[in-house]
Image (spheres, rainbow, N blue to C red):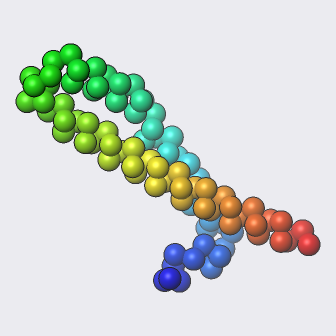
Amino acid sequence: MPRWLMLSEYHWAVLLALLGVCAALVAWISFGLINLAMANFDFLARYGLLAVREGGLLQLTVIGAKACFALAAYLMFKAIETELIHRWRDAGK
């Protein structure tokens, strides 16, 4: 595994800053994503082929890509959180 991927190699302040960035990304991307997805599904269900021709499937693909990116940011958040908690517990021993 490349050294830059190992979270244990970074200073705690860098990890804390990256944790904040990941949390902000998750919040920013996922804000309104559910409402947009439900509206898109309703649009596709209501208008069918006309909705597909008007770009409904492309919009659904973009929503899926945003959801995947939000999930990746969340997983990175949890990985950093776990690393920081392990360091905190080890420092108390």
Q: Residue at x 31, y 39 (%)?
A: 63
Whether residue 4 appears in this view of the structure is yes
User: Of all residues shown, which one is farthest toward the right?
Assistant: 93
Question: Residue farthest to the top?
Answer: 46
Question: Can you say which quadrant of the picture contains the C terminus?
Answer: bottom right
- Location of residue 43 (image quadrant): top left
Q: Tell whether 89 sits left or right of 84.
A: right
**Would residue 49 appear left or right of 10 to someone viewing this image?**
left
Task: Report the side of 11 relative to 88 (left or right).
Answer: left
Is the residue 56 above or below the residue 87 in the image? Answer: above
The x, y position of residue 56, in whole percent, is: 18, 31
Q: Residue at x 68, y 61 (%)?
A: 82
**Can you say whether 28 is above or below 76 in the image?**
above
Q: Nearer the viewer, residue 1 or 28?
A: 1
Image coordinates for residue 18, horizontal then vertical, percent = 56, 60
What x and y, as percent, mark residue 90? 83, 71
Percent from the top left, x then y, of residue 65? 32, 47
Figure disc tally:
0
Q: Residue at x 51, y 40 (%)?
A: 27
